[in-house]
Image (tube, rainbow, N blue to C red):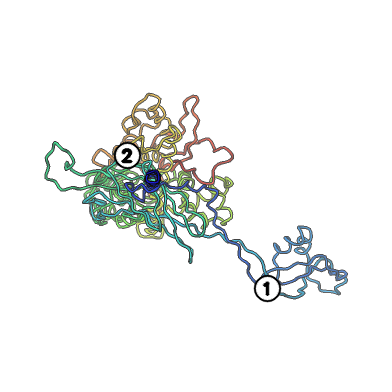
Amino acid sequence: MRQRLWALSMLIILLASAAFALPAAVPAAFAQAETPPAEEELNREVTLTIDYTAYEWWLVRWRDNEPVCYFWVDHEGLPTEDDIRSYCGDVLAGQWRSTRPCLTEPGQCAGLYLHPLGTHPDQREVTVELPLPSVWVTLEGCSNETPRNTCASLPTLVLTGEEPLPNEAIITIQGVIDGRPFSCSGDTCRLPLQPTGTRGVSVQFWAESTFGDASEVYTALVRVRPQGSFMDPDARSDEPQLWYADVLSSQWRGAPAASCADTWGAFPPIGGPEPWLTTPDRPEDLFSDLELYYLAGILIRNGTVDASSCPAGGLTADGVANECGLEVAEPAVLEWQNRFDTEIWQVARDTGVPAQLMKNVFSRESQLWPGIYADDHAGLGQLTEQGTDAMLLWNRSFYDQFCPLVLHQASCDLGYGNLDPSLQEMLRGALFRKVDASCPDCPDGIDLTQAAFSVRVFAEGLQANCEQVGRILFNLTQRSPGDLASYEDLWRLTLANYNAGPGCLRDAVEEVFDRGEPLTWDSVAARLPEGCALAVPYVEDISRELSGIVPTPTSWVYPGQPPPQVTPGGVTPTATPTRSPTRGVTPAPGTTRTSAPTITPSGPTVTVAPYPGGGPTQPPAYP
């Protein structure tokens, strides 16, 4: 009997232990994850021993043929001055550089000469930085057709690890989703998703490799929402089950996310954004037939359109087309305003910036004329030389591509914010000249290749403004922009930042927060300083008045504004009109500006305080 009781007790203990060790009710994916790898651990380096040929050289005095320095180099041909300086020092390198050819007896010559002594095989150790593993995100069970990411059932989040090194593999993928840790063996992890709130749930994930290290820690924001009323118990709807799922992450490999959504952590509305923030399926769908009086006036003044049959040659005293001039110029205006649709559409596909938004802004800014305007505005988006600051500072990927075309790579590696002011000015000037499409020898005085380039620059500039707006909001609240404002209103704030500058936007947003008001475009528009108020109709025209499809005329068309004068290669003003609010707004007492300058398509750039320590090499990322 005693032995029976002892055996029964042991069995109970073993079963209890097994229950704790193997929680069968919990999916394996949601087992406890390990601690995320620290940033300092993300260094994958390997030291290699390589064979090479060493070339021995002597640096010898002409006067007495005495060697003063000897050294080895690892390349054929004469040593460079840097080789000599590295081994022999600045003094001897300088003497060698200044030595003239010896045309008399060697003992009578001054200076130094190089003498090759021989070669021998050698080895050295080289440290090589290897690429880290990565993890990519997709959805399973959803369609990529329009509307994208619609799912017939609750979808699955798929994390796929990628190990770039041969003979190595991903061991596990780990992370945390909505506060729950998970861990999957191998290079694939499937996480069944549940319905979320409108802000979605956060995911943190990383991969571990047989190499003995891990990828960086990535993040994603995932939203799963029902479409229709099939989940409403009171609706009694026969609608089929349908879910809408979207993911915001740098590692997303599905259909392109809405532009700037990942930057802000802001989801677009269910089913897609408003028309002014969309890109059509075909470039032909960007077609417009706007009555652009200023564009018609330009085409008449530069001789593209003959309006001699009209009163006053088809022009008003302000230099824009009158009704007769517009009628005569209508075919040319129609052709010109749609000339860049294909390029706009392609840039939108490449960058994610909505094509309709770009077309609306170009119509509002320049009426689709890409030449030089008053006070040195150029391109379809009316970029200024000073306005290129935002693009070069806040769009690091564009800066990394453009800077080496102008400066040495070593200078570019410092980052725009750390460059000498003279080099910054050189970059700004080079970018502005690339945007200027004026061309005296081209048809209509416009280089269409340069005009097309200005479309891409404008898209890059808008993305820079997205980053800057996100930083302004985070600096003021320490919260993600998507937690503060809707996707559409964040775009409206970006347009205001582009038009009026970051000083105007920051002052208005700060006052909204001080008053405890919700962050909407209406609340910010009501708080813009007086000198920035013209940004309100600018944003309204593009985004709200007619969904941005039909913009109002630019300020060139406003009565009382002096007309631009056409000159070979572009348009120059007879006087400088007032086109937008003054940027130099005095900050409120106690306000410290931490945002960087922005693109300013009309007017000077706000002067802002520099970053502590001379400025960042790139804009700091916010959570």
Lateral position of residue 407 relative to residue 382, left or right: right
Q: Nearer the viewer, residue 127 or 111?
A: 127
The three-letter amino acid code for the residue at tag 2 is Arg
Viewer-nearest of discs 1 and 2: 2
Relative side of 50 to 354, left or right: right
Q: Amino acid at mark 1?
A: Thr
Q: Which mark, residue 169?
A: none
The quadrant of the image that shows the N terminus is top left
Is 332 or 1 nearer to us in this picture? 1
The x, y position of residue 604, in whole percent, is 46, 39
Percent across and percent down for residue 250 are 40, 50
Find residue 270 and report its image quarter: top left
* Relative side of 386 to 2, left or right: right
Label 2 environment density (alpha carbons within 10 Å; few <14, some 14–19, many ≥20): some
Whether residue 417 is visible to the viewer of this picture, yes or no, is: yes
Classify mark 2: helix, strand or loop.
loop
The local secondary structure at tag 1 comes to strand
In the depicted structure, whether residue 287 falls above or below residue 73: above
Q: Within 10 Å of the Cα at label 1, are there few (<14), some (14-19), or many (20+) other Cα atoms?
A: some
Name the residue beneath numbered marker 2: 199
Q: Residue 144 location, x and y as percent? A: 26, 55
| Residue occupying the point 18% across, 47% down | 241
- Residue highlighted by disc 1: 53
Q: Residue 489, image x and y in percent?
A: 32, 37
Where does the C terminus fall, quadrant-wise? top left
State if disc 2 and disc 1 touch (CB < 8 Å): no
The residue depicted at 40 percent of the width and 43 percent of the height is 2
- Vertical side of 346 occupied by 584: above or below: above
Please identify the quarter of the rendering in which residue 479 is found.
top left
